[in-house]
Amino acid sequence: MVKRVFSGVQPSGSLTIGNYLGALRNFTKLQHEAECLFCVVDLHALTVPQDPKELYQRTLDVARIFVACGIDPKLATVFIQSHVPAHAEMSWLLECSSYVGELRRMTQYKEKSSKQEVVTAGLFTYPVLMAADILLYQTDEVPVGEDQKQHLELARDIAIRVNNRFDEEIFKVPEPYIPPKIAGGRIMNLQDPTEKMSKSAENPRGNIAILDPPDAIQQKIRSAVTDSGREIYYDEENKAAISNLMVIYSLCSDQSLEEIQERYAGSGYGQFKKDLAEVVVETLRPIQERFEELSRPGVIEAILAQGRKKAEPLALATLERFQDRLGLLPLLRS
C-alpha cells in the first residue's frame, strides 16, 4: 500500500525561502511517492492572540503558497484544519490520554511560555492537537524539523498508549520523514547565522519571504552579514554567514558548493551577493506569478473545499472508531 504523509503549516508570519527550500520543495516531490495531506493549521495559531483579519488572510495565503510552490491538488489533499471539526474533537479525546508531566517537558512550551506574560491552556496542550492532526489520518510518516521532533515523539507515545489500552491498533504509530539532507542542514537567518531563518522572526531583514518583491530580496541579500576576510568557501564553523549564503545559492541554482567556490574565487562578496540576489529572484518569480493567479476570487477557496471533502471522511473514520472504543454514544448521521 502507498504510505500516507501528513504535514501542517501554521499561518503565522510570512513563509520564507527557508520553508520552500527545506520543506515545500520536498513536498512537491513527495506527492508523487505517497498519499499526501497538507494542512494549514489555523487552530494552532490561536495559542497566541491573533488579529482576526490578518489570520484570515494569512490562512488563505499559506494555502495559495502550497499550490504555487507546486503542490498539485489533484495529487495531494490541501485543506484547512478548522474546516474538519474532527481535529478539535480528537484533540480533547487525546488530552484525556495524555499526562500533564509529559506536556510540561515539551521544550517548545518552556521556551514560548517564558516569553509571554499570559500563557494560555492552548499553548500547553498544543502538542496534543498536533498529535490529533497526525493520528486522525492514520499517518505513516510526518516531515518534521528539529523543533517538532519532540512533539512527534509525544504523538507516537499517545498512539502506543491507546493501542495498548485497547489491545488493538486504533492508531498507526507515525514515523518521522527525513527529507534529503542539504548542506548545512537548515537555512539560517541573514542577520544572525546562528539562528534558523524563521517566518516569525522579530527582524524581517533576516528572512527572505517567498512573496518578497525583487527589490526587497536584493536589499536583504546586500545587507546580509558576512564573515571576516573576502574568501568565498564553505566552512560552517568558521564562516557561518557566507556558508549559509552559499547553501541558498546552491539550492536555488543546482550548482554544487564546490562549483560556487571555484566560480567566485578571488572576486569578493559584492559580486557574489549581486548574483545570489538574481538567482533567488528568479527562483521565486514563478511561485509569485502562480500565487497571483491563485488570488483571483474563489480559486483557492474551491481547492480548499475539494480538500476538505477528501480529508473529512478519513478523519471521521478514525474519530468514530476511537469514540466507539471509548464507549461514547454514536451520532446517527443522516
Image (spheres, helix red, strand yellow):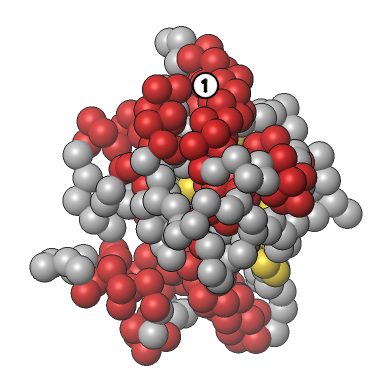
Q: How crowded is mark 1: few (under 14 residues within 10 Å), some or many (20 or more)?
A: many
Report the front residue among 50 and 311.
50
Q: Which part of the image, by quadrant, shows the N terminus? A: bottom right
- Residue in the picture at 60% in, 23% down: 282
Q: What residue type is labelled 1?
A: Gln
- Residue in the picture at 23% in, 31% down: 53
Report the front residue among 196 and 67.
196
Where residue 281 sits: x, y (%)? 54, 26
Residue at the outermost bottom position: 101
Left or right: residue 223 compared with residue 202:
right
Report the front residue among 165 and 181.
181
Viewer can see residue 295: yes
The answer to whether residue 125 is above or below residue 210 is: below
Where residue 75 sits: x, y (%)? 74, 33
- Residue in the picture at 11% in, 68% down: 117
Return the residue at label 1. 288
